Amino acid sequence: MTVAGYTLGRLLGRGGMSEVYAASHPVHGDALALKLLQVELGDAAQTRRIHHPNVIRIHDAGRDAATGQCYVAMDRIDGEDLATRLRVRPLTEAEARSMFAAIADGMHAVHAAGIVHRDLKPANVMLRGAVPLIVDFGIAKSLGAQSALATARRIGTPAYMAPEQLTGGLIAPCVDVWALGVMMFEAVTGTLPFDDFAEGRAPQLFEAAPRALSRVAVSPGLDHLIARCLERDPGKRARSMEAIARELRGEVDVEAERVTQDAGALLPAPPAPVATSAPVPMASRARRWPYAAAAIAVVGIVVTAFAMRGGAASAKGADPMVGLPDRTPDARMGSDPFTGGSSDTAPSAGRTPDEEKGSDPISGGSGSIAAVSANAIAGASASHVPAGTRAASKAFSVDVRSRPAGAQIFVAGRAVGVTPKRLELSGPTSVVVRRTGYRTANVRAERPGALDIKLRPTKPRESLD
């Protein structure tokens, strides 16, 4: 059988999306392997310019004009892959450090060429003696001028796929960092951090990765590095493959250099709010009504109190022309029928001190109606103030979750991670959640607890894909 001028020999291997054959070509020679893909061809041809001792040499990639078959032609390696080696026994820490430092070196060269592998796993690392070579760039993608891309399809092996890769098809170096973390965990423990993928389950979306140290005796440094590679938040993961390789070789202090590769924003950050002169929405007016009603009530009660006192004075014989009561001095010091207390500063005859203080029939205590009522209304108004306003200076935690998960979270226009994620907020804050193919959600976090957000799909014309 011939594909694009390559003569196929024996079958070397078969996977869910491809088959690999020994092959020969009149120009490229006889020691070749030809990978035939059953999915879209990635940017494998871009890897031809990568020359690194830990990266397989790619000779050619394309689509056969006669059969439409996508293919990748590469050097053929006579040896076993890392997956076969790990089935025999886990690696010691010294072996793992040496092996994965070399793999990280190769991946650094891949990323430097603007390529994301997307399917990094032990079966795609061939061993030439003790030297690992990264192979299978059939679904690799080029970043081009962008720091992060997304596709609508999930392509890869679920056990090694990062949460953001599973939910949004993210293509960024951070997904390869996650895969390398899974490989290192598997290499030293003999198990996968997540292994229950039956019926489409994806545990890495909702569960934190276990620590390697909880399953096998490894150094705290290696355990910490693996844990950082397996952070669900891409922004907390290892910054570069080069930094990982250096740390594996003990060239940097674990705590002295933070290791992550920020994926960048999958979607552009939402614009900052802009003040306008547009009419106030009815909902906003409705929210303001309790405050306006309280203010009106205060003014009304004050006016009523003064009117009542004025009427009382007239009832006691006040001269309407000069405002002086037509009563004796003793009579003018009599009881105020509205307050039950003295209406003047001098005590009334035959009254006890308690009676002189008087009891306000509205408040049950002494003092003017207006003053007591104003305090009562002020208290009532305070009860209408949102809790977040009264506690604006108090920090709190909130768990942001979305359905579906894997949506990007923005606070103050800055990407802070993907759902589900716990945020530490300094006070009431607007949280924006965005995911490709769904409408943006803007939720106000007012108090500690959980924000459960159900995202609504966009209409076709509103799609961001």
Image: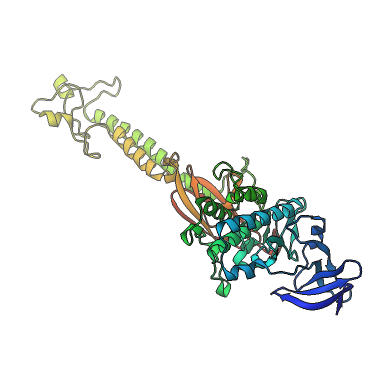
- The spot of residue 77 in percent (x, y) is 76, 67
- Estimate the x, y position of residue 246 in percent, counting from the top left: 63, 47
Q: Nearer the viewer, residue 433 or 198?
A: 198
The residue most toward the bottom is 1
Residue placed most toward the observer, 29 or 448: 29
Which quadrant holds the N terminus?
bottom right
Name the spot of residue 120 as percent of width and height, x first.
67, 62
- The reply to whether residue 407 is visible in this rendering is no
Query: Could you tell whether 303 is left or right of 433 in the image?
Result: left
Residue 445 visible? The answer is yes
Horizontal side of 170 relative to 405 (left or right) equals right
Could you tell me which residue is drawn at 53 percent across and 63 percent down? 189
Considering every residue shown, the one lying at the far front of the view is: 129
* Left or right of residue 335: residue 89: right
For the C terminus, the image quarter is bottom right
**Front in this rendered view, residue 89 or 440:** 89
* Residue 443 left/right relative to 66: left
Image spot of residue 324 (x, y percent): 25, 20
Exactly how many numbered labels are in the figure?
0
User: Of 184 and 311, which appears nearest the observer?
Assistant: 184
The furthest residue to the right: 26
